[in-house]
Image (tube, grey):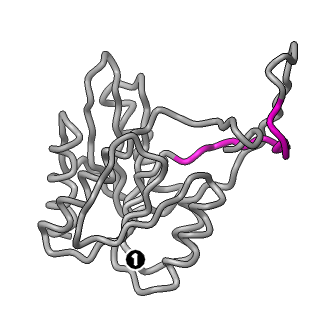
Amino acid sequence: MPIDQVRVISNRSTGQMGHLLTKELLKAGAKVTLLEGPVTDFFVAKNATIKKFYFYDDLLKLLKTELKKKVDIIIHAAAVSDYKPTKTYRRKLHSGLSKVNLVLVPTQKIIDIIRQLTPAATLVGFKLEPESGTSALRKKGIKLAHQADCDFVVANTTAQNRYRAKIINAQGKILSSANSRKDLARQLIKVLKDY
């Protein structure tokens, strides 16, 4: 989210999950449109349509346009900001200021908007809980599935510097587990194909 003409509030997401999912979906024969944020790695997939966004408002606008088309599956893996500044400064803030106060307000949950725009599509949500163990992951995944009306949720963690993920259906059943992002992409596509 922009603070001024130069500075932003960001996160540590690399975009790797979206890239891995795109590769696996293409291998499975899917037609893919990837909405890609400001990622750290350059990515090319000649058979996919890639559309860039930088901030929350950009993603929301793109989604509203893309979801006017017929879509069968939406995998919402983007690390979207939950808060935005109440004010964006039109000019660059001077570096000599002794203090800058930023007031943040919640953004609307994009996954809720997705379900409203595409009630018939299969919706996969992602729930990152960096410090959670396995039982907490399942609970958080079920909660997101109910709140956002997801068909599936990927509840993932990086606790103890290890990536782990559970794929959970709307009824709370763990359908698959993965210990790497690459394995998760494969497992999720398998679950979707069997659905």
Determine the residue positioned at 39% across, 68% down.
74
Q: Amino acid at mark 1?
A: Ala
Return the x and y of residue 70 as percentages of the image width and height: 41, 86
Residue 161 lies left or right of residue 121; in this view the side is: left
Q: Main secondary structure of the magenta part?
A: loop
Return the x and y of residue 116 as percentages of the image width and height: 57, 73
Determine the residue positioned at 30% across, 19% down.
161
Return the x and y of residue 183 as percentages of the image width and height: 15, 44
Residue 64 in the image: above or below residue 147: below
Residue 50 in the image: above or below residue 130: below
Return the x and y of residue 123 as percentages of the image width and height: 40, 66
| Residue 135 placement: quadrant | top left
- Frontmost residue, 149 versus 62: 62
Circle 1: element type: loop
Is residue 87 part of the magenta span, yes or no?
yes
Instruction: Report the quarter where the N terminus lies.
Output: top right
Determine the residue positioned at 18% across, 39% down.
178
Residue 50 lies left or right of residue 37; in this view the side is: left
Q: How many marks?
A: 1
| Residue 132 placement: quadrant | top left
Determine the residue positioned at 80% across, 36% down.
92
Number of other residues with Cα within 10 Å of mark 1, as a class: few under 14, some 14 to 19, many 20 or more:
some
Q: Which portion, as a residue range, is magenta?
A: 80-93
Which residue in the protein does label 1 denote? 121
